[in-house]
Amino acid sequence: MQLSCYCLPAIQTPLVNKFYQANRVRGRATKQDTIWVVKLTELIAACRVQKVEQDAFLSTVFVAPKYRGQGIAKQLVASAIRSEHIVYTFAYQDVVPLYQQLDFLDISPDTLPEKLRDMFVNYTKQGREITAMCFQRDVNA
């Protein structure tokens, strides 16, 4: 399914938070985040790229349940990282293969920038089974 992914204007941040809340998704978008969405008549998928200090951090990737398995998350993430040179994310175990298809690599949490490393440690202490991953665009491509 080929859908249009687009960057949501900051003024529309409350729309994505309503989408997340309606679907019981952890995390809230802020106007400082770059928010990417897929919309039919309503939002069906969203993610955000946060700046954690100077680093790009992809988070809160969510596709509405009835639209899963159609490649929407892959299109959404590809759009969100298109203009970034390096992007970090913490992937739940079941979606690691999705990120690997998009050239994210598993990395040791010890190699994360300090603030992201602290976040990773806190999340794993909460019982989240996540993998630290990094996408790095080939500057020669």
Image (spheres, rainbow, N blue to C red):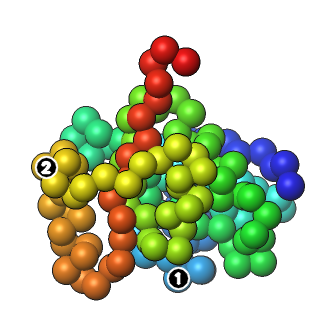
Count of numbered circles in the view: 2
Residue 22 to residue 135: above or below: below
Please indicate, yes or no, whether residue 136 appears anywhere in the rendered image.
yes
Q: Is residue 137 left or right of residue 3?
A: left
Which residue is disc 2 drawn over? 114
Instruction: Determine crowd level at label 1: few under 14, some 14-19, many 20+ residues with C-alpha closer than 10 A.
Output: few
**Where residue 131 appears, x then y in whole percent?**
36, 65
**Where residue 9 appears, x then y in whole percent?**
57, 42
Quadrant the C terminus occupies? top right
SS label for mark 2? helix
Instruction: Determine crowd level at label 2: few under 14, some 14-19, many 20+ residues with C-alpha closer than 10 A.
Output: few
Q: Residue 71, located in which quarter of the rendered image?
A: bottom right
Q: Nearer the viewer, residue 1 or 60?
A: 1
Residue at left offset 25%, top offset 35%: 54
Residue 121 to residue 36: above or below: below
Q: Please give the label number shown on residue 109.
A: none
Q: Is residue 50 left or right of residue 66?
A: left
> Residue type at mark 1?
Arg
Residue at left offset 26%, top offset 73%: 123
> Residue type at mark 2?
Glu
First in sequence: mark 1 vs mark 2:
1
Which residue is disc 1 drawn over? 24
Please indicate, yes or no, whether residue 43 appears anywhere in the rendered image.
no
Q: In the image, which is nearer the foreground, mark 1 or mark 2?
A: 2
Could you tell me how far apart the alpha carbons at marks 1 and 2 are, in whole angstroms? 29 Å
